[in-house]
Image (cartoon, rainbow, N blue to C red):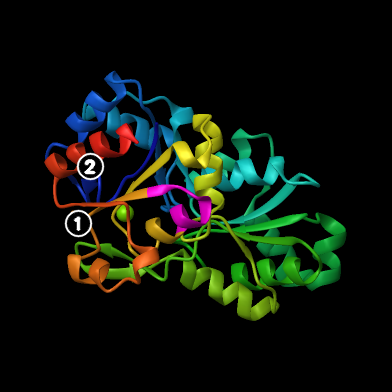
Amino acid sequence: MLLLVDLDGVVYRGPEPVPGVAEVLVRRAGLGDGIVYVTNNSMHYRADYVARLRSMGLPVTPDRVVSAPRATALYLVEHNPPARRVLAVGALGLRRELADVGLEVVAADEAVRRAVHERIDGFVAARRPDTVVVGLDPDLTYDRIAVAADAVRAGARFVATNRDPTYPTERGLAPGAGSMVAAIQVASGVEPVVIGKPEPLLLEEAARVGGASPSDVIMVGDGVLTDLPAARALGARTVLMLTGVSTRKEVDALPADERPAAIAEDAKELEAALEVLAKG
Ligand SMILES: [Mg+2]
């Protein structure tokens, strides 16, 4: 069995580990299950997750972390025709993931300067990206939106890491990648390809990395609006944890054919659910 394990709301909540989950995953790995960690977070590099998960005692290697930026990078090089030169609107983690798979990442600031003065024709002539990737960009500016929209309008493929409208912080909700994707979508008039959940592409990449067919995949997630529909689109079963964003009320309100295979309130219930699903 391959477990696709969502991070925030399942393995940890903000800075705090979810009690007992790491131990359950260690025991499942000992029984032979594969584990690939997945997250819609578009800001960080895989090494950041590897360090954090190892500090919690979890067995993990960088290839077993499929974040939205990593899945985006894999998608771009596997897609036909493959991307070569990418204009990235996003954080450092996104740019590093794109560069890791051999893509030429156009420095957004340099491109911005050119585009502001030369607009579409000059920009395209100077250094035409074949793809524009948008994730959460904490330094997003008006000029950066303008150059990304120009490039998309000039024919570059438009790819979004994810479309989460917001994400939770200690000070309440902060604008997510989706709010920035929306700005460039509206300015360019083009719909992006979306990699992250609830679209299935991130989980497809993760299942491929784990070498499993969808019927052998169990998604362990906390999002009724993200993890659950993405897993269903992949053809995988879901254990929905109530340790994160979703409540039992929200799960109960789902139509029968959209319910998760199991619901778990804590690590103990997760372990019991995985034992049942492993049997058949
Ligand atoms: Mg989550």
**Disc 1 residue crowd, few under 14, some 14–19, many 20+, Cα 10 Å:** many
Measured from the top left, where is residue 39 in percent x and y?
40, 48
Magenta-highlighted residues: 230-237
Q: Residue at x 29, y 50 (%)?
A: 8
Q: Residue at x 22, y 45 (%)?
A: 12
Q: Nearer the viewer, residue 235 or 51?
A: 235
Measured from the top left, where is residue 124 in percent x and y?
83, 62
* Amino acid type at mark 2: Ala
In the rendering, which numbered label is found on residue 144? none
Q: Which is more foreground, mark 1 or mark 2?
A: 2
Residue 114 in sight from this viewpoint: yes
Q: Is residue 183 left or right of residue 77?
A: left
- Residue matched to label 1: 242
- Residue matched to label 2: 273
Q: Is 233 contained in the magenta span?
A: yes
In which quarter of the view is residue 87 placed? bottom right
Q: Are marks 1 and 2 in contact (CB under 8 Å)?
A: no
Up/down of 199 relative to 83, above or below: below
Q: Is residue 159 left or right of residue 14?
A: right
* Amino acid type at mark 1: Leu
